[in-house]
Amino acid sequence: MLRKRGSLIICGTFLFITWNAILVLLLWGRPPPSQPGDPGQEQRELAEKPANDVVGDVLRMADTFEAELERQKQILLQIQNHQSLWETSNRNRPQVVPPHQPVIPILVIACNRVTVRRCLDKLLQHRPSAELYPIIVSQDCGHAETSEVIRSYGNQVIHLKQPDLSDIAVPPAHKKFQGYYKISRHYRWALNQVFKTLSHTSVVIVEDDLEVAPDFFEYFRALLPLLKSDPTLWCVSAWNDNGKDGYVDPGKANLLYRTDFFPGLGWMLLKEVWDELEPKWPASFWDDWMRQPEQRRNRACIRPEISRTLTFGRQGVSLGQFFDKYLRYIKLNTEFVPFTKLDLSYLKEETYREKFEKDVYSAPIVTYEDVKQGQLKGPGPFRLQYSSRDSFKMMAKNLGIMDDLKSGVPRAGYRGIVSFISRGQRIFLAPPPGWTQYDASWS
């Protein structure tokens, strides 16, 4: 409509200018009026008759132009009178909206730590959209001070309270593990709230002692389509178990891996996987249960080179296990990586496996002593080979990475291979070529 209105204004202006130009030309060429009794008047009248016929034609044409100009003027007046109607019509017209983006809720598992404030502050600081990333805090334990901290955030978070605070009957040998049983019960209840009550299709789970990186939300947003489309994946984790400062490449904040080990500590789960796990959810030790072959089913998770979460909770049911030796030294990413703009197709199973194994087994093999004493020459990568459970544990422990195995799977491992940095050089701690499967007896 605005384009049509502009065309009419230009047309009217052109006609107006043309008409005035014609009038000026006519007035300029008209002879002066004759005086009565002028002896040459008759001769001039005879001579001017053909010219007067032309002038008459021009005057008639001018009259036509003048009538057209008046008609255009009326059209412009009508346009002005209906302008408000057009503006109202445009306001009521459906707006062009960007493609639908899925909502990814963040589930914070809380209990009795008032330091949940640190976790929530960082989530809110880095959250790009309240609509796309609703924060759901599920609280167990009934701890009043923690509840008050969560309540202080008002409508910035959704505060759920696990209703069953009773003790759980446990085997006598597990009496000291009562807390692990309550955590497992809480997880089951909270995930059912997210998927069954609130009807979400995915969730990112963090515990109340985790701090998130600036690109935490970007990371999970970018990897959600891959998690949905690749049946060989079952989770995305923000955590690198061997992500201590000095053991990761600070220049590779965008580097991601597949791993056969379930990392936890900030991880994404789909509703379809929860529907599979919920009916057989364990009474306790849910994370180690997730690492069993019956649950993993040869599926992998995605994990980063540099962690997107950092745990600050030394006190908890694990009584500081691993915290002082490993967890407190984990490097938290500080560089925002625009993952949604990157091509992540290299993480698909067939593509990734072929390239990763080629990189590992084409790397020169080195000895443990060379790595330990820093005698490697060149930029790397290098391959350090283990052949048994004991040789893996010895080398991992002495080189400063985590040496425990769950159902035979090393932490951060993929097809038995653990990648880390030692003295600035990339090391692949790997089984011999031809590896086929994990040995659950190595746990």
Image (cartoon, rainbow, N blue to C red):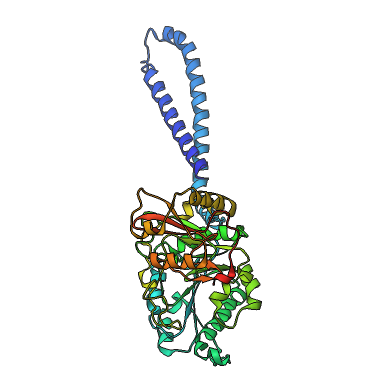
Looking at the picture, how far across and down is residue 435, in whole percent?
A: 57, 57
Looking at the picture, how far across and down is residue 11, in whole percent?
A: 48, 34
Q: Is residue 394 visible?
A: yes
Q: Dividing the image into 4 quarters, which one contains the C terminus? A: bottom right
Count of numbered labels shown in the rendering? 0
Q: Place residue 311 in its image quadrant.
A: bottom left
Q: Is residue 104 visible?
A: no
Looking at the picture, how far across and down is residue 331, in whole percent?
A: 37, 65
Depth check: give the residue in front, 250 or 39.
Answer: 250
Query: Horizontally, is 402 left or right of 230 in the view?
Result: left
Depth check: give the residue in front, 189 or 372.
Answer: 372
Looking at the picture, how far across and down is residue 236, in whole percent?
A: 52, 64
Depth check: give the residue in front, 376 or 27.
Answer: 376
Look at 42% across and 70% down and name the residue there.
123
Q: Is residue 234 above or below residue 349?
A: below
